[in-house]
Amino acid sequence: MVRSTLCPSFSVTYGVAAAATAHNKPPSSNSLQFSSFMKSPPRQGTLVTILLFINIYIPCLSSSSPCLFAINLGTALRLIPSSSFRSVFFIWALCLNIADLLPLSAIRDLQVQYIAGMPFINIPFIKYCRAAAVVGLTAFSMAASSSAADKMIYGTDDRLDYYEMPERFRYAADATVLMTRKGMLKSLPDGNFRLVAANFGRAYNLCPEVKFRDQPVTAGCSGALVGEDLVITAGHCVQAADECSEAAFVFDYSVKAPPSGKMDLTVKPENVYHCSEIVRSAFTEVVETPEGHLKPVPPDFALIRLDRKVTGRTPLTVNRSGGLKKGAQIFVTGYPLNLPLKFSANAAVTRDIDDDSYFVTNLDAFQGNSGSPVLNAGTGLVEGILVRGEDPSFVATPAGCKVYNTLPDLGGTGLEVNKIGFLLDNIPQAPGQAAAEGAAQPALDPVGAILPLSPQDVNFDW
């Protein structure tokens, strides 16, 4: 399948601009050394600003994005006092950017750890642009080496916020976790964190009628707790030790009550975990045939051990007996487009491609859902990990704004789910599961029968 980033709009991020020149380049071998250096970025902004211009701001000029141009201009005017030096600097920086002397991993670390805390940009519009740039570039960097495609809506958009989903399915949402980067969590004086985010509608230039357009978006993948300190996610979300060391896992990024005003993005420290090790992972590039079909995909999964045991949450139980059939009702919890957690149901297994590998479904999901647990609505067990789908996520309208890309319920090629069987040897068995599997599983009511027709309108004051 052709590569695609998590950031389809120039107004969100430098990521797309970077993709034009650096998208297919292998990760640099010196990313660990540069990451270590940038953990304590210099307070004086001259050197850092030069690097930022070379690798971030200059490419943004070609995107015709007023948001990113504002970042560029605002920084130049505030940190480079000499107009003559600015002129020389712009030419020099542009040449260096064309030469692409700095690795993408260095750009990522520099951007996340410095831009997020830039104290010299105080204009509200530019402050928003800064957040959009942080979110976008981080999302791009987390997917730069993946081939996970965008995902879309099939039939009616069935996604619900946490407070809207049936209570009996909230156990899955409580065990679902946002996998992001440490740089996306800003430390607060009271010991809490604030999640760096941008406004969804403005970031993607969405039309007024687009669902969830007033909610915040951050950057990352989805995952789920399957052991007291074990999380499953997609393999393309974390592939190397340096990515593990920079990862942060955040629980409870969700809308738990009808919104009234701006969403509070404060994160309690007890809800933040870090990656201790990659227990097991697999990911290989896939390609798209001329007919638009995917070749049989290899495994795409990762099992992460956290830095400590998770308390106050029950790990999800995985299906160890197989038997998933075409037509089985399923649901998913995760962070589509890195919005707050969404529950999506009214979907089924549309194709069971391989008994031991993966299946296809018509769930409503997007990039950001990569790594989401896909559960059987009849048994409540995890059947697999959502890994890839179709693109694009958005389509332009004559009005110049964008809306979700929507297909018929059984249209397109569908979303692909890596079966959980690959990880059974590494995931501890839930208490009593062996005995329970020999008996008939209690049937749950069909998910679709108990869901409201559509979620309530959400209006955050962003």
Image: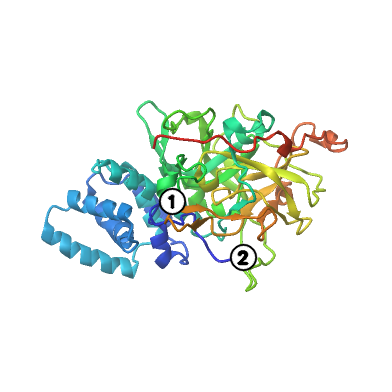
Residue 319 visible in rendering: yes
Q: Nearer the viewer, residue 236 or 389?
A: 389
Residue 309 visible in rendering: no
Q: In this view, does 287 lie to the left or right of 410?
A: left
Task: Tell me residue 244's x, y (percent).
Answer: 51, 48
Task: Tell me residue 116's x, y (percent).
Answer: 34, 44
Q: Residue at x 45, y 64 (%)?
A: 23
Helix, strand or loop at label 2? It is: loop
Please name the residue that numbered disc 2 is placed on.
286
CB atoms at circles 2 and 1 under 8 Å apart? Answer: no
Task: Tell me residue 61's x, y (percent).
Answer: 30, 61
Q: In this view, does 142 lie to the left or right of 428?
A: left
- Name the quarter where the C terminus is drawn: top left
Q: Which residue is drawn at 74% across and 39% down?
A: 377
Q: In this view, does 176 lie above or below 361?
A: above
Q: Nearer the viewer, residue 242 or 163?
A: 163
- Name the quarter where the N terminus is drawn: bottom right
Q: Residue at x 62, y 53 (%)?
A: 387
Tell me where residue 318 sits by quadrant: top right
Callout 2 environment at 10 Å: few (<14), some (14 to 19), or many (20+)? some
Q: How far apart are marks 2 and 1 (CA)?
A: 27 Å
The disc label shown at residue 133, or none: none
Amino acid identity at mark 2: Val
Numbered circles on residues, count: 2
Q: Nearer the viewer, residue 7 or 303?
A: 7
Task: Tell me residue 327's x, y (percent).
Answer: 78, 49
Please name the residue that numbered disc 1 is placed on.
204
Q: In this view, does 300 lie to the left or right of 89?
A: right
Amino acid identity at mark 1: Tyr
Q: Which residue is drawn at 68% across and 33% down?
A: 169
